Image: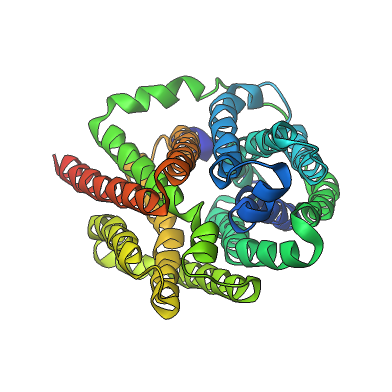
Amino acid sequence: MSTLTRELVPQRQAYWSSVFAMTLCVFALIASEFMPVSLLTPIALDLAVTQGLAGQGIAVSGALAVLSSLTISPLAGKCCRKVLLLGMTALMALSGLIIAFAANYLVYLLGRGLIGIAIGGFWSLSAATAMRLVPEASVPRALAIFNGGNALAMVIAAPLGSYLGAHIGWRGAFFCLVPIAVVAFIWQYISLPSMPAQTKASSHGRVFHLFTLPVVAAGLAACGLFFMGQFALFTYVRPFLETVTRLDNNRLSLLLLAIGSAGFIGTLLIGTFLTRGFYQTLIAIPLLMAAIAGTLMLAGHSLWGVAALLIVWGGLATAAPVGWWAWVARTLPDDAEAGGGLMVAVVQLAIALGSTLGGIAFDSRGWQSTFALSGGLLVSAAVLAFITSRKTQE
């Protein structure tokens, strides 16, 4: 029986208001993390840096999220989880304020670092917290509600950021997230029950032990390369659309909304594909995305061609994490907490590395090299997903 499962005994009453309060926080966290994707150009112009350097804001938040996700577990063993969750929410609000009023690039990076700490800490605690808020039979529903906040943010963060950036500036777009964070803080403060530290030992020591399992090492490497490939390209999609496809702000916002909507639909449909062919789906998604990256290099000047390709990209990219989280549950049923924390760290590290390498390529050799890098990483992810499927059968 896993650590998280043992937390369910004895059965607790359901705190659904707390679940929805945390879902609002999830929405604001994900929106904060990916808001720069749709605001890269104005951020770079205002802070007098290249678009590649502006994109490093996502890399910084990803790197700090890695550290936070790996260190929050021992901290959670000593502190009340309600206090920790409120602390992560407060960091998110502070991050929004710092970014909105950033006087220079370094202050902007400081704000991005704080949001990274909040993301890693909150996500690492969310699954375990859900299992303390509702009875065992209702845990899947609570986690599905959390993921609903994630999916909604992925749908509207980029287009909303682009729209707000065009009307009230990129600083105003980030500032709009602060009141949401404040509401989430107050709602959680009122609704979350007291969740004192657990007396049992932390599972932190088991996290790195999982790397000794060949199937886990291969699977996490495949997952990491997938996210590296995704964000090496998607972080710089706005400058590509502006300079190559030549979209104005209105069309850009509409396309980003279409990409996000396709992602939401993808999360609804991927379950069927995973049921019919689990590993086949995990292999096919990065291969299809690599093909899209290559085709964009050839058809980057075609408005309708680019739009169609990026909409398909959105549907695939947003749905894929559902498959990898399902892989964690299938592969590590008795180490869900340790595996989940490790997954958060791998994903955030991959986002940081992908956006960093993509930015270096974008600034030094142009957008084509960024897209080629993305394609290569995604093909590598597919190969490792295939190797993972074989090791599962051993």
Task: Please provide percent x and percent y for residue 260.
Answer: 54, 68
Task: Please provide percent x and percent y for residue 81.
Answer: 70, 34
Note whether 141 is above or below 337 in the view shown: below
The C terminus sits in image quarter: top left
Task: Please provide percent x and percent y for residue 329.
Answer: 39, 46
**Is residue 8 at all visible to an observer of this figure?**
no
Of residues 393 and 148, the one nearer the viewer is: 148
Task: Please provide percent x and percent y for residue 389.
Answer: 20, 47
Of residues 310 and 349, the one nearer the viewer is: 310
Of residues 15 and 28, the one nearer the viewer is: 28
The N terminus sits in image quarter: top left
Classify residue 278 by image quadrant.
Answer: bottom left
Classify residue 225 by image quadrant.
Answer: top left
Note whether 377 is above or below 258 in the view shown: above
Q: Which residue corresponds to the image point at 75% horizontal and 52% vertical from the top-left?
A: 174
Q: Which residue corresponds to the image point at 49% horizontal and 60% vertical from the top-left?
A: 240
Q: Which residue corresponds to the image point at 50% horizontal and 35% vertical from the top-left?
A: 341
**In the image, is 283 to the left or to the right of 324?**
left
